[in-house]
């Protein structure tokens, strides 16, 4: 069945809650652990159906945010999702209070029990109105972003289309594109500041209703973090500053000298060559090459990509009204992953076929064997699947870039290393904002500027109107839509670079380890999964030093080839 042919029917949230209520009764009256396990199956089946329909509605909304039917359906799930989550909390509580809990721990994956314990800290019926409001605010922002256009050289274009010009080989064009971006954001600054302010205050209220000092702690629980906390992230952040930032700063200085740039600006940060590598294939050619790549990579990846192409599980072409981001989602009732993106003619188009397909492949491998509750794991785990696949695809880069293959590899790894300080800024910014929910818009912008100078000292945005004020965060969707979902990328990036190092030593051995890692999904917590893959946790002493050293050595070797 093609993805477009999957039937949609609004899921009845009340019916799902009714199933959960009956399961709770069954658990409370259980005569054996088997009764509890039967109740678990009832709940999982009901949730699988509910989340499949919700995922379908959201995907079809993002395909065209002007579609009134799916816009209304998304509004429905925005309202009902918290109700189902609170109902599920009753089920989790019943499991944790069951007299058969000890026996249950021997029957199901122990990570599931840890998730139930975390769920109790993240959700309460006391905050349902605020959860509903948060969903509505996120939708309000998402609609704005997807429908917003940017006037560039007399044409109104989408952000996805504008990004192509922000990476142009011509410096004046890049600056012009960023100026257009800044002007548009400034025109809508009142809305952006207001909607974010409402989000922050609403999330702060949620946290305080739950008995927390601020939203930071609740945000961590919402992200499902089972093996690391705020203190560990703080140490990671300090290690980024001490071990990654100096290396990136030194390498960026070398790039600037090579390009003849006296002072690096925001619009120079993604540029490494006088003529950056571009895909040698058109959009459809990239997908076809991706299919050939995965067929050669392994029997598993080949079967996966054939399935994706046969079911038309990609929507990657940019058009007006389409949401601006990219993602992989799944329709669990049909065991079907789906990839959404906005191709724009840059190297990012190839990254979709590796990054988002990395997510989808991990789903394809783990979904049949990993308990439903655990899925792909928390986000830092899921991102290791995608970011690592990007590097395993290096073996096939020539298919996409021809003579510029090594230039792409160089840019790709340099981007990956450079991203870690940026991702740390995004996370640190949110910590500060949620610890100080009454900040004014200017105070927030000042925080962003300060962090930029600290973590990205090699450049500034001083000559880009509006963005020079510290407003770069306003077009980072995650800050609005998925609070605290960003350090995950940084943690995953360090693991992915470790996989790259291993693949350079012995590709087949490294890929075998990756295959096992992807198949484990969320069966273990993040740090255990990294250990099982034979890699070092990003939180370990010296881990980031090694990542920086590995990256610098590989970049140096690549540089000698062009």
Image: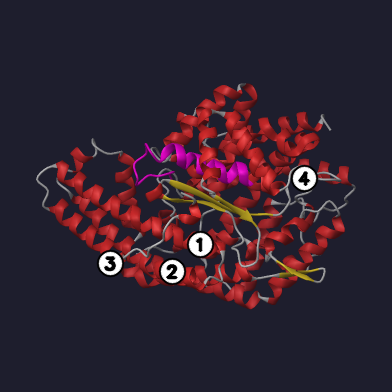
- Viewer-closest of 562 and 326: 326
The secondary structure type at the circle numbered 2 is helix
Q: Nearer the viewer, mark 4 or mark 1?
A: 1
Q: Residue at x 65, y 48 (%)?
A: 421
**Which residue in the protein does label 3 denote?**
14
The magenta span reads: 352-378
Mark 1 highlights which residue? 60
Q: What is the residue that sits farthest to the right in this orientation?
A: 260
Residue identified by numbered label 2: 73
**Element marked by disc 4:** loop
Q: Earlier in the sequence, mark 1 or mark 2?
A: 1
Whether residue 41 can be seen here:
yes
To which quarter of the image does residue 106 belong?
top left
Are dots 1 and 2 in contact, CB under 8 Å?
A: yes
Q: Nearer the viewer, mark 2 or mark 3?
A: 2
Q: Is residue 391 left or right of residue 365?
A: right
Residue at 56% from the left image edge and 71% from the top image edge: 66
Indicate which disc, 2 or 4, sits on the residue closer to the N terminus.
2
Along the polypeptide, which appears first: circle 3 or circle 4?
Answer: 3
Residue 278 numbered tag: 4
Whether 368 is among the magenta residues is yes
CA–CA distance between discs 3 and 4? 51 Å
- Dot 1 or dot 3: first in sequence order is 3
Mark 3 or mark 2, which is nearer the start of the sequence? 3
Q: Element at badge 1?
A: helix
Q: CA distance from mark 2 to mark 3?
A: 15 Å
Residue at image coords 59%, 63%: 323
């Amino acid at each position: 069945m093609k993805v477009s042919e999957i039937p949609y029917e609004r899921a009845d949230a009340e019916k799902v809650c009714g199933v959960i209520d009956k399961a709770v009764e069954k658990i409370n009256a259980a005569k054996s652990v088997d009764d509890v396990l039967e109740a678990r199956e009832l709940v999982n089946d009901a949730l699988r159906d509910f989340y499949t329909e919700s995922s379908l509605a959201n995907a079809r909304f993002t395909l065209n945010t002007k579609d009134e039917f799916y816009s209304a359906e998304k509004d429905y799930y925005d309202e009902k999702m918290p109700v189902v989550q609170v109902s599920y909390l009753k089920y989790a509580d019943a499991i944790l209070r069951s007299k058969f809990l000890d026996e249950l721990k021997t029957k199901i994956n122990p990570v599931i029990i840890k998730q139930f314990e975390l769920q109790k800290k993240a959700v309460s019926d006391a905050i349902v109105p605020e959860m509903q409001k948060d969903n509505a605010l996120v939708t309000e922002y998402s609609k704005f972003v997807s429908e917003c256009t940017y006037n560039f050289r007399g044409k109104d274009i989408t952000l996805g289309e504008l990004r192509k010009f922000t990476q142009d080989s011509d410096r004046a064009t890049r600056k012009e594109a960023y100026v257009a971006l800044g002007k548009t954001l400034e025109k809508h600054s009142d809305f952006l500041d207001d909607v974010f302010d409402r989000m922050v205050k609403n999330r702060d209220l949620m946290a305080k209703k739950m008995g927390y000092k601020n939203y930071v702690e609740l945000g961590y629980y919402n992200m499902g973090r089972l093996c690391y906390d705020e203190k560990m992230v703080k140490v990671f952040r300090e290690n980024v500053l001490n071990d990654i930032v100096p290396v990136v700063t030194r390498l960026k200085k070398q790039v600037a000298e090579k390009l003849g740039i006296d002072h690096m600006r925001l619009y120079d940060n993604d540029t490494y060559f006088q003529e950056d590598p571009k895909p040698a294939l058109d959009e459809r050619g990239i997908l076809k090459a991706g299919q050939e790549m995965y067929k050669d990579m392994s029997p598993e990846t080949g079967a996966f990509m054939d399935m994706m192409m046969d079911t038309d599980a990609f929507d990657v072409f940019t058009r007006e009204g389409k949401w601006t981001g990219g993602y992989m989602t799944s329709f669990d009732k049909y065991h079907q992953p789906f990839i959404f993106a906005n191709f724009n003619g840059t190297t990012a188009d190839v990254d979709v076929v590796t990054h988002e397909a990395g997510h989808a492949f991990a789903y394809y491998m783990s979904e049949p064997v990993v308990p439903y509750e655990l899925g792909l794991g928390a986000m830092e785990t899921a991102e290791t699947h995608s970011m690592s696949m990007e590097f395993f695809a290096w073996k096939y880069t020539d298919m996409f870039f021809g003579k510029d293959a090594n230039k792409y590899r160089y840019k790709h790894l340099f981007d990956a290393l450079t991203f870690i300080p940026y991702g740390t800024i995004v996370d640190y910014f949110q910590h500060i904002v949620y610890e100080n929910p009454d900040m004014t818009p200017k105070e927030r912008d000042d925080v962003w500027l300060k962090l930029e100078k600290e973590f990205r000292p090699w450049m500034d945005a001083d000559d880009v109107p509006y963005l020079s004020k510290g407003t770069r965060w306003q077009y980072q969707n995650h800050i609005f839509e998925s609070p605290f979902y960003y350090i995950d990328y940084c943690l995953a990036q360090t693991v992915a670079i470790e996989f790259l190092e291993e693949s350079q030593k012995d590709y087949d051995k490294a890929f075998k380890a990756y295959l096992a890692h992807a198949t484990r999904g969320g069966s273990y917590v993040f740090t255990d999964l990294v250990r099982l893959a034979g890699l070092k946790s990003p939180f370990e002493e010296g881990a980031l030093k090694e990542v920086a050293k590995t990256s610098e050595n590989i970049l140096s070797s690549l540089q000698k080839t062009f």
